[in-house]
Image (spheres, grey):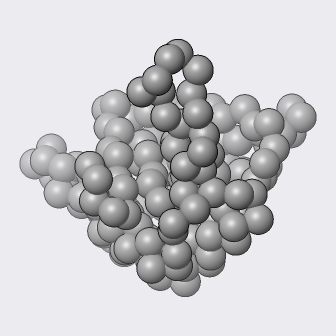
Amino acid sequence: MRIVVQRVKKSSVSVDGKVIGSIGKGLNVLLGVTHEDTEKDADYLVEKLLGLRIFTDSEDKMNLSISDLQSSGVETGVLCISQFTLFGDCRKGKRPAFVQAAAPDMANGLYEYFLKQLREKSVPGTRIEKGEFGADMTVEITNDGPVTILIDSTKLF
């Protein structure tokens, strides 16, 4: 399982022109699932995500997590969007192969589990929003920094 984490000023996701999820300050998370992933992978990523220190402190150093901000009274959110293309393999040719991406039923199950764990383990008041699994979505991101972090549950990178 892997995630692309972007620190954002705001982010939203739309399906058929209708906004189905949006946040202000927080994290935009793109999540990909491979056929070898389990709930343990999701648990690892939730813990890593909530403790990821990529927000600046009073000395302008990236020293605060989303949990730190929410605990100190700053309204934050996480917008999580399933994205099977994170397991696209472009090593051969120019057309990505998606053989490492999990089958839809499995991927959706782990995506929903990830969201459930995120809701349960985040600081109360943290807004948790999501995209629509399998839908053609439009994602608008106002990246802050920009700051983009890649995390893989197998610690590949």
* Residue drawn where x is 44% and y is 33% of the image: 143
- Toward the top, the furthest residue is 94
Position above or below: 148 against 27: above
Image quadrant in which you'd find residue 117: bottom right
* Residue drawn where x is 42% and y is 48% of the image: 5
Q: Where is residue 124 in the image (x, y as percent from the top left)?
A: 51, 80
Image quadrant in which you'd find residue 65: bottom left
Q: Name the residue nearer the viewer: 134 or 140.
A: 134
Q: Name the residue nearer the viewer: 24 or 131.
A: 131
Q: Position of residue 66 (x, y in %)?
A: 37, 62
Q: Where is residue 62 in the image (x, y as percent from the top left)?
A: 18, 50
Q: Where is residue 55 in the image (x, y as percent from the top left)?
A: 28, 51
- Left or right: residue 136 compared with residue 7: right
* Residue drawn where x is 52% and y is 75% of the image: 38
Whether residue 68 is visible to the viewer of this picture, yes or no, is: yes
Whether residue 83 is visible to the viewer of this picture, yes or no, is: no
* Residue drawn where x is 37% and y is 63% of the image: 153
- Left or right: residue 11 compared with residue 26: right
- Toward the bottom, the furthest residue is 120
